[in-house]
Image (tube, rainbow, N blue to C red):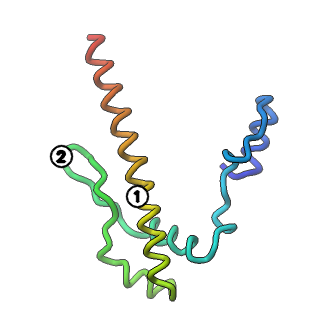
């Protein structure tokens, strides 16, 4: 959802537009942040096989991808990538807790 779609949805639903909830356009971010997002989306995810736990990104191809995109400020971009990966980790952790809670609820009903 982009900012325009969010505003249209709020208007249709009669909600007040919350500036903090408006989706950000990646093109408005600084170059290094855009590059970190490219890396985040390019690097494969590592998943634990038995229970499906997200383990993070596989960095084995990081240097090659940075070369392909001609990323010059590598340290800053890498630091931003780690921040983004940390946020992904929180997201997947929250999702796992929700699934676990739902499973406990469903087991309690049977």
* Residue shown at the point (63%, 64%) measured from the top left: 26
Residue that label 1 marks? 86
Left-right relation of 23 to 76: right
Residue plotted at (77% across, 50% down): 4
Residue topped by disc 2: 50
Would you say 105 lies left or right of 9 here? left
Residue 91, x across and y down, in percent: 43, 47
Q: Which mark is residue 96?
A: none
SS for callout 2: loop
Query: Is residue 19 positioned above or below 69 on the image?
Result: above
- Residue found at x 51% / y 85%: 73
Q: Image height check: is 52 above or below 98?
A: below
Q: Looking at the picture, how far across and down is residue 110, in whole percent?
A: 26, 11
Q: Mark 1 falls on what kind of element? A: helix
Spatial CA span between label 1 and label 2: 22 Å
Is disc 1 in contact with disc 2, using a CB cutoff of under 8 Å?
A: no
Question: Residue most toward the top?
Answer: 110
Compared to residue 99, the image places residue 83 above or below, namely below
Q: Quadrant of residue 46?
A: bottom left
Q: Position of residue 62 (x, y in %)?
A: 37, 78
Q: Residue furthest left?
A: 50
């Amino acid at each position: 959802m982009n900012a325009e779609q969010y505003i249209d949805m709020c208007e249709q639903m009669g909600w007040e537009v919350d500036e903090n909830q408006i989706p950000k356009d990646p093109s408005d971010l600084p170059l290094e942040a855009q590059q970190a997002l490219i890396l985040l989306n390019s690097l494969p995810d590592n998943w634990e096989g038995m229970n499906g736990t997200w383990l993070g990104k596989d960095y084995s191809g990081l240097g090659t991808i940075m070369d392909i995109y001609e990323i010059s400020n590598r340290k800053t971009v890498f630091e931003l990538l780690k921040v983004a990966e940390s946020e992904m980790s929180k997201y997947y952790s929250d999702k796992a807790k929700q699934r676990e809670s739902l499973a406990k609820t469903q087991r309690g009903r049977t």
